Image (cartoon, grey):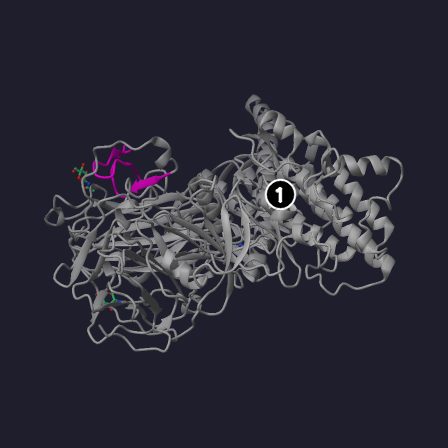
């Protein structure tokens, strides 16, 4: 994988040009009916379709609905596109449009989202002279209150797509079309697709990704558009076909797609292009459009690779450097893995005024570069938050009750220029806008006073005068604490003035006007109903008010809870960003066996041996030292475990878990490449009598760091992971003696968030560390790791192995329990520490170890509790010895960062404007600029 953090180029003027997508048509894939859960949560709207019933699209097998129910019925006008633009390949969903002759802003509201989850949002636009005016419009799109993109219709027959990958800030999302004076906004269709949150990790709560280009290279047919069901996420992959200049390669076999970050469809990865002339490189330039308002947020890309051909001979090699805008973006030489989907992506957005990708063959390479697909996005900010959600909820209910038309669409207060008529908001940069004043006088309001007004908690002034309001005044209005002015005059209200309001009038906190309401009685509770019907109103109205208030209160409570969760996520996120930049990246590099030979100098230096095979020392081109764990063919650890570990490691990142730099799966050869841990295993340190024994404080630090690593697996990973083989041999130490957990070959993911047990077919783990409950029942849980960790902790205290080789082998747990039962703590402590320890801290650590190794899993603490307790030991040690810690780097007990490298939290929407896309594939006949780092072939 790559590191795209070069910042070259300024924000810039874009070349606007357009490519007519004459060919935007799905291929016929109606044959197989997809499983329902695949499209569960899809919303596919055919805008402008008359009536209430939808249809099933034959090409995609997706169900389209009309837009009724997603937009106010009086907003916009339905049209059919001109018949001359309808060809057999025009998607049915584009045959009609809804256009918006009135109102500066018109919005669709898509409900039933889950706040915090990631979605792909797509607007579709085919003008096709629907209005007979032949005037190509240009207008803006917003996602809620955040600018999404400008839709520039460049030709009548061009299908324009706007796509965004975004994280839902709320349980609904609004898509707003804004008339900016460039012609009447219209829309043909709107799609919403739920995405797994780990997809597109750079889309998060604060930023969305707006699609600029998505190309699939090498399909033989230029009409091949890949989307659902081939792509379960229904991304639209446009074909790039140019057989004159490029060789299309199509794999006969299935491509392995392991990655969890982008999951390109099989059909996209099975095709690629290479230059016709084997001595040429690949270079092409894509336009960065002028539509991102804020270029400072930059761009992100993902380039997909997969070797589709078997090398013609044993000395054949495809190897190249990957440059973005002339800067090496992937720091090593790159060889695409055979029949396995791989990618290079941005770890953070880059700045640019143009996007140029160059793939330059190395001197050693005998085959030209290859490319399978590319995606390019601009980043938009989604940090603008809409109006106070309680106010929004209330005012939308008011709008519904009185069928308010006007400009009451989208957010009530934002943007300020489009705030709703009759409302005055108050803005404060540190919190969402609130509604302060409602003036709906002379609005011809019918019916009662909406009790929802009472939920506008920040209301200071309300003028409902000169309407046709009937019924009585809701008592709930007296709960508006800030209300200073209320004008109800010139209506048809009746009944008493609620005592709460009267009280406010009496203490002069409220100015109440109610003249010209024939049936209002001013003497409060003594007011008698004149007609029977009024009695009903007296009883029914309060009941309704109470029910509504309860509902409002419940909703408020829910919203608050959501808010809270959101903010926790945010803080976690920030932490991630901090650490993420220094990590080796999300994507794992795939090495060839030959590269491993070079890296390890022909597997010269053995670092260790395990069930998997040997671990060798190696160093990368840039001097980074690595450990290469090579699977031996006689290994009893299977391919599945190997892959399991590769998968686990590529998605978890924590300072106390050993990180994977890459892997190799080259025919029969398999290896994992890790960061090098020069101080070896904890087991060596404990068993070694020659090396200076670890001092007590250092042991506590190792315990704390290992515990933090495990805590992260249990609590920070989603789904949680059980390591299944915690032992001193699997805890490695770096040059600063910081501990990291290694060997995830046996780890298991839970599917539940609680401590539900998982069943395993075979009992894994190591004798002496294995949870007895798990050995007995085959049911593992996070508490199985806690047990094993308890054994590790005992080893740290005692300096003895997990099984003591006595005349009769005895477990360290029983050995320690026997001595402690006699109160003999000194008899347990490792004598090599030579009294260099605080006995209280040792007692406490031993106690923790014994709790961890309780027979009954329920009686064992969680790793989070263990972390806290060990931190207390360290504090105790420091207080008692008065010493500072020269090694320990973690400052607090929890240094975890659960989303890192995997980003369970966030993704946002992107906008795709495919038809405007300009793709200029250029030939690099001369080969690109030569750089020291990039040897170029002189074949
Ligand atoms: C569009 O065409 C359909 C039939 O194809 C028709 O039922 C519908 O009324 C037309 N809509 C408009 C706005 O003319
Ligand atoms: C919109 O498209 C037209 C036609 O392609 C082009 O001339 C114009 O420059 C574009 N406008 C913007 C702001 O990109
Ligand atoms: C409400 O608006 C009307 C005009 O529509 C105006 O006459 C009246 O003074 C306003 N009320 C308040 C309280 O400002």
Determine the quadrant in which ligand 1 lies: top left
Judge by depth and name the residue closer to the eye, 427 or 860.
860
User: Which residue in the rendered view is the most extreme toward the right?
Assistant: 823
Q: For the residue labelled by badge 1, is the local secondary structure a helix, a strand or a loop?
A: loop
Quadrant of the rendered structure where residue 494 is? Answer: top right
User: Which residue in the rendered view is the most extreme toward the front?
Assistant: 807
Looking at the rendered image, the quarter that the C terminus falls into is bottom left
Q: Name the spot of residue 428 as percent of width and height, x first.
A: 58, 61
Looking at the rendering, the stretch of residues picked out in magenta corresponds to: 42-66
Residue that carries the numbered disc 1 in the rendered image: 726
Judge by depth and name the residue closer to the eye, 720 or 663.
663
Q: Name the spot of residue 117 as percent of width and height, x first.
A: 47, 45
**Side of 263 relative to 516 (left or right):** left
Examine the structure image and report whether residue 575 is included in the region drawn in magenta: no
**Side of 314 relative to 85 (left or right):** right
Q: Name the spot of residue 839 as percent of width and height, x first.
A: 86, 50
**Side of 274 relative to 742 (left or right):** left
The crowding category of the residue bearing disc 1, from other C-alpha atoms within 10 Å (few below 14, some 14 to 19, many at least 20), is many
Q: Magenta stretch: dominant SS? A: loop
Looking at the rendered image, the quarter that the N terminus falls into is bottom left
Residue at x-position 86% and y-position 60%: 881
Residue at x-position 49% and y-position 69%: 623
381 is higher (above) or lower (below) than 195: below
């Amino acid at each position: 994988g790559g590191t795209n953090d070069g910042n070259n180029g300024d924000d810039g003027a874009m070349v606007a040009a357009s490519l007519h997508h004459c060919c935007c048509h799905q291929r016929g894939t109606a044959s197989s009916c997809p499983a329902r859960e695949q499209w569960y949560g899809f919303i596919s709207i055919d805008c402008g379709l008359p009536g209430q019933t939808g249809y099933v699209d034959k090409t995609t097998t997706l169900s389209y609905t009309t837009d009724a129910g997603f937009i106010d019925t009086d907003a916009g006008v339905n049209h059919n596109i001109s018949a001359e633009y309808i060809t057999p390949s025009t998607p049915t969903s584009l045959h009609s449009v809804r256009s918006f002759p009135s109102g500066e802003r018109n919005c669709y509201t898509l409900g039933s989202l889950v706040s915090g989850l990631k979605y792909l949002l797509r607007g579709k636009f085919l003008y096709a002279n629907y209005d007979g005016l032949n005037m190509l419009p240009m207008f803006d799109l917003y996602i809620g209150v955040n600018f999404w993109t400008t839709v520039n219709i460049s030709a009548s027959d061009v299908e324009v797509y706007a796509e965004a990958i975004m994280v839902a800030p709320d349980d609904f999302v609004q898509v707003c079309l804004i008339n900016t004076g460039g012609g009447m906004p219209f829309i043909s269709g709107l799609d919403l697709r739920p995405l797994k949150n780990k997809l597109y990790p750079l889309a998060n709560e604060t930023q969305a990704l707006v699609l600029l280009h998505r190309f699939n290279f090498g399909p033989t047919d230029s009409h091949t558009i890949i989307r659902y069901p081939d792509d379960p996420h229904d991304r639209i992959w446009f074909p790039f076909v140019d057989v004159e200049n490029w060789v299309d390669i199509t794999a006969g076999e299935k491509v392995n797609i392991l990655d969890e970050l982008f999951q390109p469809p099989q059909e996209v990865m099975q095709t690629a292009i290479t230059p016709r002339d084997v001595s040429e490189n690949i270079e092409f330039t894509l336009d960065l459009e002028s539509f991102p308002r804020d270029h400072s947020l930059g761009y992100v890309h993902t380039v997909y690779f997969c070797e589709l051909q078997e090398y013609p001979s044993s000395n054949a090699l495809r190897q190249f450097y990957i440059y973005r805008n002339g800067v090496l973006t992937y720091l090593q030489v790159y060889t695409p893995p055979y029949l396995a989907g791989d990618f290079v992506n941005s770890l953070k957005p880059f700045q640019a005024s143009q996007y140029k990708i160059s793939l330059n063959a190395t001197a050693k390479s005998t085959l030209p570069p290859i490319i399978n697909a590319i995606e390019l996005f601009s980043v938009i900010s989604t940090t603008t938050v809409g109006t106070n959600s309680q106010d929004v909820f209330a005012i939308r209910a008011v709008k519904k009750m009185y069928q308010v038309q006007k400009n009451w669409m989208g957010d009530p207060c934002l943007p300020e220029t489009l705030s709703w008529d009759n409302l005055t908001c108050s803005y404060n940069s540190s919190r969402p806008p609130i509604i302060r004043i409602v003036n709906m006088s002379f609005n011809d309001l019918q019916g009662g006073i909406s009790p929802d007004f009472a939920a506008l908690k920040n209301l200071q002034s309300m003028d409902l005068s000169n309407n046709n309001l009937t019924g009585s005044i809701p008592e709930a209005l007296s709960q508006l604490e800030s209300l200073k002015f209320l004008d109800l005059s010139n209506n048809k209200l009746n009944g008493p003035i609620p005592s709460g309001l009267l009280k406010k009038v009496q203490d002069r906190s409220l100015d109440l006007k109610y003249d010209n309401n024939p049936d209002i009685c001013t003497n409060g509770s003594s007011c008698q109903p004149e007609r029977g019907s009024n009695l009903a109103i007296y009883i029914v109205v309060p009941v309704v008010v109470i029910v509504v208030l309860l509902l409002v209160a419940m909703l408020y409570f829910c919203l608050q809870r959501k808010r809270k969760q959101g903010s926790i996520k945010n803080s976690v996120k920030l932490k991630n960003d901090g650490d993420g930049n220094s990590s080796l990246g999300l994507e794992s590099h795939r090495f060839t066996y030959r590269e491993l030979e070079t890296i390890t100098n022909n597997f010269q230096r053995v670092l260790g041996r395990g069930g998997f095979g040997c671990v060798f020392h190696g160093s990368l081109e840039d001097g980074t030292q690595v450990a290469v764990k090579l699977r031996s063919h006689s290994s009893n650890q299977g391919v599945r475990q190997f892959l399991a570990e590769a998968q686990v490691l590529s998605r978890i990142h924590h300072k106390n878990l050993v990180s994977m730099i890459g892997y190799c799966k080259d025919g029969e050869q398999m290896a994992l490449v890790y960061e090098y841990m020069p101080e070896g295993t904890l087991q060596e340190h404990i068993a070694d009598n020659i090396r200076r024994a670890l001092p007590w404080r250092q042991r506590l630090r190792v315990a704390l760091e290992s515990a933090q690593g495990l805590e992260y697996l249990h609590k920070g990973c989603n789904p949680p992971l059980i390591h299944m083989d915690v032992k001193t041999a699997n805890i490695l130490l770096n040059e600063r003696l910081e501990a990291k957990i290694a060997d995830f070959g046996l780890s298991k993911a839970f599917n539940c968030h609680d401590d539900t047990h998982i069943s395993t077919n075979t009992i894994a783990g190591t004798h002496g560390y294995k949870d007895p409950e798990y050995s007995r029942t085959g049911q593992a849980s996070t508490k199985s790791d806690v047990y094993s960790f308890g054994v590790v902790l005992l080893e740290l205290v005692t300096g003895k192995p997990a099984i003591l080789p006595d005349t009769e082998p005895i477990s360290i747990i029983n050995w320690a329990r026997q001595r402690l039962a006699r109160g003999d703590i000194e008899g347990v402590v490792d004598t090599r520490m030579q009294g260099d320890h605080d006995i209280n801290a040792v007692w406490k650590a031993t106690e923790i170890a014994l709790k961890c190794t309780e027979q009954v899993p329920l009686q064992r603490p969680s790793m989070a509790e263990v972390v806290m307790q060990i931190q207390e030991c360290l504090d105790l040690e420091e207080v008692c010895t008065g010493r500072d810690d020269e090694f320990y780097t973690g400052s607090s007990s929890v240094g975890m960062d659960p989303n890192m490298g995997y980003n369970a939290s966030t993704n946002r929407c992107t906008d795709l404007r495919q038809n405007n896309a300009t793709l200029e594939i250029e030939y690099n006949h001369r080969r690109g600029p030569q750089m020291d780092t990039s040897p170029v072939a002189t074949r």
